[in-house]
Amino acid sequence: MKFRQNCDKITYSILDVLVDIKWNGVTMVKKVKNYTEDEFKLYLDNLYQKTNDARLIDPKTRSRIFKRMDEACEITGLSFPDLLQRLDFKPRDLTIEALEAFFAELRSIFWLKKFGFTTIAPQQAKNNTQPDFRAKYGEKESVIEVFCLTKEHEQERDIVTGPYRDFDPEFEGSKFRRDFFTKAKIKKKQLDSINSEIKILLCAINSTQ
């Protein structure tokens, strides 16, 4: 559909899920795509073509990915398309880093369940005040922010000897320390703006490694 008045430069396709937005103070409707399981498979195919990462076409790896997606659907009570949307699946971002970030949120569902959280609900990001997850711990309301340190944040290696340099996160020159705290501070700021009885900052490291 297209918005006409005051929206000549913005065109929205007819997609599946309605999300409220505001334009010049007037509440309007934007359509947001609900991607299917087949479209997720196509995304993995396209990502392989872009990155040549053989793990993406390995049958066992594919089977594990879809098994975990099905398990996450069961935990959250969401359909496959709804779960993709809530985890901010970005099919146009054909980078391993984007896939790792997606997997980081997917893995968070299992971490939360393992540690006794219930009614685990991924939240589709609309702005920086929306947490990645809402859940309950006993009777307490909880919000969870997730961030991921991917291969691009990998610790630098010594060119001559090979081992990682300054790996200890307590060392001021550690790349891991620098990247971890940079991302953590951004996510903590988001958590600080949300009212909740429990606030959790969850970091996944190299989730496709």
Image: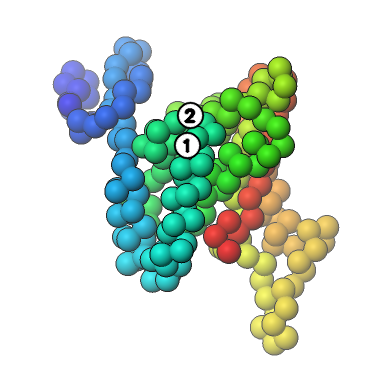
In the rendering, which numbered label is found on residue 77? 2
Q: Which residue is found at the position 17% from the left and 26% from the top?
A: 2
Task: Give coordinates of residue 117: x percent, y percent.
Answer: 67, 30
In terms of image quadrants, where is residue 31? Answer: top left
Three-letter code, disc 2: Gly
Residue at the (80%, 63%) spot, across then down: 168
Q: Residues within 10 Å of mark 2 (few under 14, many from 20)?
A: some
Using the image, tell me which numbered label, if any, was put on residue 91: none
Q: In the rendered image, which quarter contains the N terminus?
A: top left
- Name above or below for residue 112 compared with residue 98: above
Residue beneath label 1, please? Answer: 73
- The answer to whether one can see residue 182 in this image is no
Q: Are marks 1 and 2 in contact (CB under 8 Å)?
A: yes
Q: Residue drawn at (18%, 18%), measured in percent from left and top? A: 5
x, y percentage for residue 130? 54, 27
Q: Amino acid at mark 1?
A: Cys
Circle 1 SS class: helix
Q: How many marks?
A: 2
Label 1, label 2: how many angstroms apart (C-alpha)? 6 Å
Q: Quadrant of residue 189?
A: top right
